[in-house]
């Protein structure tokens, strides 16, 4: 029921939802559809959100609508509140979080902790196995002895599932970790001292906190990232040296693991944190890091990315500054998506790739220079990400302007670059400026909520024509209101 009610809420973004539509799309009887809407109306009216926004769900002539209509910011907040609530109440989700945090446990442990019967726990563990199979990830629930069960598989994949299982559901209304507090994670982050942490939006800061929590819960339970390939170690030590030094010092002080594995842990964390929080380094710093990567003559990952960019110089004008920024971007994404196995959790957006001649040429260059990856299950995800990042980076940068815009996408981080550069390319740079620090912005463009004291523009997806149309209208309105045109 909660799953269907969530679908109804998401449909309401486009306006009223009719009972007939629910019957057709969800294969329900009219009575079942009406009951779902009535349950949703009751829960909505009892929620703090309804009281705060002074809104209600009204069923009129077999159509459900919100009165008065919600703003984009309110709608996103509503979706997040109900999504977190429904997942927090889900037996399966709570079992998944317990298993990911404990790693080794007995059925009686889960039954006591979650106040379930043991027979129900066995059913939930069976559903977890089905979930792992559905996701096609190499994670198993293995019997250790007569009483203990252990979660086994690729350590990087397990941590990725744990991080995404929290980050996708929670935007901060609930702290979903059970064995580490939010205060402990914040203190840990302060002790590691990320130089650019304060540049991040509230959502970006939460991502870093979640990654730290997952890493240190794993280490406390005795699970470590095993030996990374030498080329990844070389890249990590070249690009993320300052972050690694601070991280290594902290792990050494805590005496959590030996020096070799500490290095693996820090490299793994550095790549993930810079992928999920792309503004940890500013563009000038990314250029500098790209130049350092360019000096690695024997690293095959860097070599492939450089050859790919060189291939495109025949077709595009790529300034040296952009070339090295792209070298940094592509290297980080290739490592994270393929070598650290993020691809196992990435959807493929078939309509996300541009169909113009520029996109087609970039695809050909990728096919030519990443041949060794073409038979890998990660390849389509790499290609999707690369095309968007490269195409988005070819527009010119903006100069100082009146309205400062911060762009951040949660569901498809690569969209950030495209939207940023389309804005800088097509809008007068004396009117609109893209900024890399959240605090400097007065407008935020995002596909999620969680931003305070900023004007939020909800951008559904880069292939959504309505989002682009509304963005143009929005900026025109901003300029007209400011300059009284």
Image: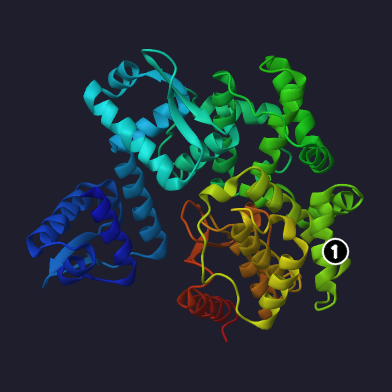
Please name the residue shown 37% across and 65% down the image: 71
Q: Picture coordinates of residue 46 (x, y %)?
A: 20, 47
Residue density around tag 1, few if under 14, some if 14–19, many if 20 or more, within 10 Å: some
Q: Is residue 225 left or right of residue 451?
A: right
Colour scheme of this structure image? rainbow
In the foreground, 469 or 260: 260
Residue on which disc 1 sits: 321
Q: Is residue 22 left or right of residue 436?
A: left
Instruction: Let me know if residue 217 appears in the view.
Output: yes
Q: Picture coordinates of residue 338 (x, y %)?
A: 65, 49
Please name the residue shown 60% across and 80% down the image: 483
Q: Picture coordinates of residue 434 (x, y %)?
A: 67, 65
Q: How many marks?
A: 1
In the foreground, 138 or 24: 138
Most distant residue in the front direction: 375
Q: Is residue 180 left or right of residue 365?
A: left
Q: Picture coordinates of residue 423 (x, y %)?
A: 64, 73
> In which quadrant of the rendered image does the C terminus lie?
bottom right
Residue 378's place in the image compared with 235, above or below, is: below
Instruction: Let me know if residue 282 appears in the view.
Output: no
Q: In which image quadrant can residue 226 be found?
A: top right
Mark 1 lies on a secondary structure that is helix
Residue 293's place in the image compared with 360, above or below, is: above
Residue 230's place in the image compared with 108, above or below, is: below
Please name the residue shown 68% across and 36% down the image: 268
In the foreground, 42 or 146: 146
Most distant residue in the bottom direction: 485
Please name the residue shown 19% across and 52% down the image: 45
In the foreground, 315 or 457: 315
């Amino acid at each position: 029921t909660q799953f269907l009610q969530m679908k109804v809420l998401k449909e309401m973004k486009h306006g009223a939802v009719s009972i007939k539509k629910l019957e057709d799309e969800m294969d329900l009887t009219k009575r079942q559809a009406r009951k779902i809407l009535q349950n949703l109306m009751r829960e909505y009216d009892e929620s703090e959100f309804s009281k705060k926004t002074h809104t209600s769900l009204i069923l009129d002539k077999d159509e459900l609508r919100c009165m008065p209509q919600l703003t984009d910011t309110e709608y996103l907040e509503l979706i997040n509140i109900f999504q977190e609530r429904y997942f927090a109440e889900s037996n399966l989700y709570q079992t998944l979080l317990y298993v990911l945090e404990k790693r080794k446990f007995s059925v009686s442990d889960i039954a006591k902790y979650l106040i379930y019967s043991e027979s129900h726990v066995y059913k939930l563990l069976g559903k977890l196995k089905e979930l792992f199979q559905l996701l096609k990830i190499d994670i198993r629930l293995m019997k250790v002895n007569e009483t203990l069960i252990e979660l086994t598989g690729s350590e990087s994949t397990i941590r990725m599932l744990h991080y995404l299982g929290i980050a996708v559901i929670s935007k901060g209304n609930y702290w979903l970790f059970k064995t580490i507090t939010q205060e402990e994670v914040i203190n840990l982050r302060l002790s590691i001292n990320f130089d650019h942490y304060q540049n991040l939006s509230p959502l970006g800061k939460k991502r870093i906190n979640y990654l730290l929590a997952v890493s240190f819960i794993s280490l406390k339970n005795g699970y470590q990232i095993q030996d990374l390939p030498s080329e990844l170690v070389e890249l990590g030590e070249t690009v993320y040296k300052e972050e690694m030094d601070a991280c290594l010092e902290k792990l050494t002080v805590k005496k959590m693991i030996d020096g070799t594995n500490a290095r693996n842990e820090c490299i793994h964390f550095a790549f993930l944190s810079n992928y999920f929080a792309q503004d940890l380094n500013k563009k000038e710093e990314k250029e500098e890091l790209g130049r350092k990567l360019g000096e690695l003559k024997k690293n095959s990952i860097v070599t492939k990315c450089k050859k790919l960019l060189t291939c495109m110089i025949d077709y595009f004008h790529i300034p040296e500054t952009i070339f090295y920024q792209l070298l940094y971007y592509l290297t980080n994404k290739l490592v994270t998506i393929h070598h650290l196995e993020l691809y196992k959790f990435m959807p493929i957006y078939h309509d996300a790739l541009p169909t113009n001649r520029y996109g087609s040429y970039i695809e050909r260059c990728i096919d030519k220079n990443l041949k060794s990856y073409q038979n890998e299950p990660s390849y389509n995800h790499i290609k999707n990400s690369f095309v968007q990042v490269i195409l988005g980076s070819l527009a010119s940068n903006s100069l100082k302007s009146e309205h400062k815009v911060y762009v951040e996408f949660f569901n498809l981080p690569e969209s950030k670059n495209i939207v940023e550069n389309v804005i800088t390319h097509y809008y007068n740079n004396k009117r609109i400026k893209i900024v890399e620090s959240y605090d400097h912005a007065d407008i935020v463009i995002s596909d999620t909520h969680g931003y305070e004291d900023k004007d939020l523009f909800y951008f559904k997806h880069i292939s959504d024509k309505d989002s682009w149309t509304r963005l143009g209208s929005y900026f025109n309105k901003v300029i007209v209101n400011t300059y009284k045109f």
